[in-house]
Amino acid sequence: MYKILHKQNVAPQVDAVIVDAPYIATNAQAGNFVVLRLHDRGERIPLTIADSDRQKGTITLLFQKIGKTTEEMGRLKAGDTIKDVAGPLGHPTPMKRYGHCVLVGGGIGSATLFPILKGLKEKRNKVTVILGARTEELLVWKDRFKEYANDLVLTTDDGSAGRKGLVTEALKDLIESSNLKIALAVGPIRMMQAVSEVTKPYGLKTLVSLNPVMVEGTGMCGACRVNIAGKTKFACIEGPEFDAHEVDFQELANRLGFYRDEEEQAMKKYKKRCNGRCKK
Amino acid sequence: MPCPTTYNKTMRVRDPKKRAKDFKEVALGLTAKQAIKEAQRCLQCKKPKCVEGCPVEIDIPRFISSIRDNNFLAGLKTIREYNLLPAICGRVCPQENQCQGACILGRKKTPISIGALERFAADYEAAINETETVEIAKPNGHKVAVIGSGPAGLTVAADLAKLGYDITIFEALHEPGGVLVYGIPEFRLPKKIIQREIEYLKSLGVKIKVNWVVGKTQTVDQLFEEGYKAAFVGVGAGSPRYMNIPGENLNNVYFASEFLTRVNLMKAEQFPKYDTPVKRAEKVAVVGAGNVAMDAARTAQRLGAKEVYIVYRRTEHEMPSRAEEVEHAEEEGIKFEFLSNPKEIIGDEKGYVKAIKCDKMVLCEPDASGRRRPDCSGEEFTLDVDQVIMAIGQTSNPILTKSIKGLKLWGAGYIEIDENGKTNKPGIFAGGDIATGAATVISAMGAGKRAARSINEYVMTLAKAPRQRKKSSKTAK
Ligand SMILES: Cc1cc2nc3c(=O)[nH]c(=O)nc-3n(C[C@H](O)[C@H](O)[C@H](O)COP(=O)(O)OP(=O)(O)OC[C@H]3O[C@@H](n4cnc5c(N)ncnc54)[C@H](O)[C@@H]3O)c2cc1C
Ligand code: FES
C-alpha cells in the first residue's frame, strides 16, 4: 500500500499527488516512471515521476483524467492509498553538459520535463523551455518551470497566454536564432511528431518520451513495443526516450488506439455505477 | 499425436465441449481408488529408471508404495523431501520425457501415471486441509534476499527458511508466483494451489515484498548494504522472443506473455469487472508449439474464438509442449498447421491483423544435433485470421543482470553459474530460467535446491570467519 500524502488539482482535468514511496524516491532519476495499480481489480498504468524528494521519501505523479483509472485516481484524497506502485522504471534521461538545450512540452508532458529540466540545470546547461496548450489554464506547472528555466516560452492556441500559435513555431524561431545542442519533446503524439519534423532538417538531436500501452513495465510482455528505425524496441526497458527522428509515430498512434472501445466501455460503466461520486 | 506408450490416460478430464468455454481446471485427478490401483501396477524396480528420469530424483517407488498401502500422506512426505511443489509439478511437469518416459512398463504397455499420483497425494492433503509440520531451525539471524518468486525463488526461500534464515523474497509484479501466476492458465493450474504454497512459505516466516523490481527499486548492492548476506537471483527468462517479420506490431498481434498476463494475472477475461481488457477474436493463429503456445491457443478459445490454429514450422513429432496439453488442445478443437513458417502478418488499412502469410516447410535430414531442420518448400499460403499470438519462446530479461556490474553472462544474457548455483560474484547465486534459458518448473526447483545448499555453506563460512578472527584475537590477549 502506498499512501497519498497530498493531492492537488493543477489544471482542468489534471491532478497531482504526492505519494509515500521512499525506496522509489531514493533511486528515481529524471525520465523514470512508475507502474501503478489502484486496487485489486485495477489495471496497471504507467505514470512519469514528475518530481521526487529523497529526504521526505516521496514521489509526485501528475495525471490527466482521461480514462477510467485516472478518473478513479482523481477521486482519491490525501490519506487514501494506492495498492501497488512499482518503480522507478525505464532508462533515465542521459544527463550531461550539452550546452543550450530546449525542452518542448505539450499538456501533461510537462510532468516528464520538469525533473529533466532540474537535472539539466544541475549539469549547468542553458535550458529554454517551450510549453504549449490550447489555453492558459491548461499550461501545467508554468510557475515551477519559470523558477528553473533560463527562458520560458509559452504558446497557446487562443493567445490567452504567451505567443498565439503552436510550440513548433516557437521552436523553429529558437533554432534559427540560437545554437541548440539538443531538443527533448514530450506530449501528445502529434505534437512530438511535429517537433521531430521541425528539428530534422536542422540535424538537431531530438529525444521524445514515448507513452505506449504498458502492462507490467518490466520488459516481460512486449505490450509497449515501438518501432525505432525499423527495429522493435520495448519502451519500458529500452526507453521511454528514443531518438525522435527514428520513431514510427504512425504505428505508435495505431497501437495506442487499440483499446479505445474498451476504455470507453469501462468509463461509461464507471460513471453509471457511481454516478460520478463513488471512489471504487 | 503423442506417443501412446509414454502418455497415460488414467486421469479423469472434463468434457471438452464444456471445458473449452470456461477457465475451470480441465484435468480432475485420480480418485483414491484409482490411485491405489495405479500404484499397484508399479513393479518397484530395484534400479528404478523413473528416478533417473526425474530432474530432482524423487524416490518414486517409495512414494508409490506408500500410496499403494493407502498411506497417502507418507507418500507425499517422501515427495516433499525432493520437491517443494508436488501439487504444481504433478500438473505441469513434462512427465512423458521424464519419469514416465523412463518407466519400464512403458516399453510394452502404458507406463505408471507418476505425475497423476504425485498430484493425487498433494491434492489429498489439501482436501483434508492438512499441512505437513516441518521442523524449522532456530532463527540464525542471517538475512538472505531471494529475487523473483517463481519456482526457483520459492524453493530457495523454503529451504533456507527451514534452516533458520531470515528470508525476504523480492518480486517485481504485484503478486508472487512467477510464471505459475502470470503464465500458466487457471484451467491447467488453479491459482488457489499457488496461494496455498505461498501461505505455507509465509508460515515458515518468509517475508514477501511485491512491486520490488530489483535493479531499479533497489540494486543488489543496496540490498547488501541493508545487511543481506547473500542474494539468490531467480528472475526467470521473462522477455518474449519475436520473429522480426513484417506486420508483427499490427494491432491484434500479441506476444503470448502479454496475452496470458492480461488474462491470468490481470483477469482480463472478466473485463469490465476487472479494469484490464483483452481483445477477443474470431479466428486466431498462435505461432509456436510449446506449452506457452498451447496455453495461449486454449485461452483464446475460451475467450470465444471460433477457430484457433497452432502454426508450427516443424511437425507433430517435434512439438515441445507436454503431450497432455497437445491432446487436450486437440480435443477442444484447436487446429494444427504443421510445417508452416510465418513470413508476414498482413494488416488492413486501419492497422489491424487481417491474415498471416506462411512458407510451407519441409524437414531436412537430421543435422549434427540430431534435429531435423525445417526448410522452405518454395510454396506459401495465407490464413485469414483477425488475431495472431506469438509464442516462439522467451529470452533473458536484462533489468537485473545489467544492474550487477561484472556479472558473468552467457548466450542471450543468461547468468553463468556453476553446478552449485554460484555466479562469479561472491554472495550472488542464481538458478532457474535466468541461468538455463526457458526450461521447466521442476528444473527451476532443482536449481533452487542446489543454490539453497550452497548459499547455506557460503553464509556459514562467512559467519564463521569473523568469529574465528575474534577468537584468535582473544587468545592473543
Ligand atoms: C505460459 C507458460 C507455460 C509453461 N508451462 C510449463 C509447463 O507446463 N511445465 C513446465 O515444467 N514448465 C512450464 N513453463 C516454464 C516454467 O514456467 C518456467 O521454466 C519456470 O517457471 C521458471 O521458473 P523461475 O523460477 O526460473 O522463473 P519464473 O517463474 O519466470 O519467475 C521469475 C519471477 O521473477 C520476477 N522478476 C523478474 N525480474 C525481477 C526483478 N528485477 N526483481 C524482482 N523480481 C523479478 C518475475 O516477475 C517472476 O515473477 C511454462 C512457461 C510459460 C511462460
Ligand atoms: S510493458 Fe510489458 S514489456 Fe514493456
Image: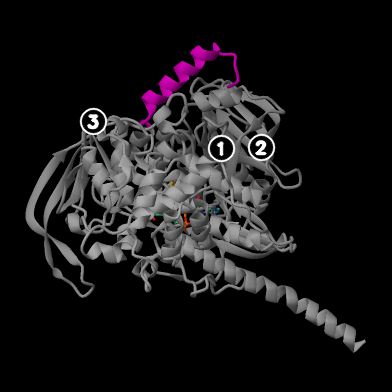
Name the residue that disc number 2 marks. Answer: A2
Q: Amino acid at mark 2?
A: Tyr
* Residue B346: x %, y % from top left: 19, 40
Quarter occupied by the C terminus of chain B:
bottom right
| Secondary structure at numbered mark 1 | strand
Residue under disc 1 on the same chain as residue under disc 3: no
Q: Subunit of mark 3? A: B
Q: As shown in the figure, which amino acid type bears the numbered disc 1? A: Leu
Q: Which segment is the magenta one? A: A257-280
Mark nearest the camera among 3 and 2 is: 3
Residue at position x 61%, y 22% from top? A75
Report x, y in % for residue B367: 18, 72
Q: CA distance from mark 1 to mark 3?
A: 32 Å
Task: Kindly tell me whether mark 3's CB lies below 8 Å from ligand 1.
Answer: no
For marks 1 and 2, the one nearer the N-term is 2
Mark 1 → mark 2, Cα distance in angstroms = 10 Å
Where residue B136 sits, quadrant-wise, is bottom right
Callout 3: helix, strand or loop? loop
Q: Which residue is mark 1?
A: A36
Residue at 12 percent of width and 66 percent of height: B364
State if disc 2 and disc 1 touch (CB < 8 Å): yes
Q: Which is more toward the observer, A274 or B304? A: B304
Between A222 and B23, the residue placed more toward the observer is B23
Q: Is residue B168 left or right of residue B40?
A: right
Q: Which residue is mark 3?
A: B282
Assign ligand 2 to one image quadrant.
Answer: top left
- Kindly check if marks 3 and 2 are in contact, taking CB atoms under 8 A apart as contact: no
Q: Position of residue A57 (x, y in %)?
A: 72, 44
Q: Position of residue A268 (x, y in %)?
A: 45, 16
Q: Residue at x 47, y 59 (%)?
A: B398
Q: CA distance from mark 3 to mark 2?
A: 41 Å
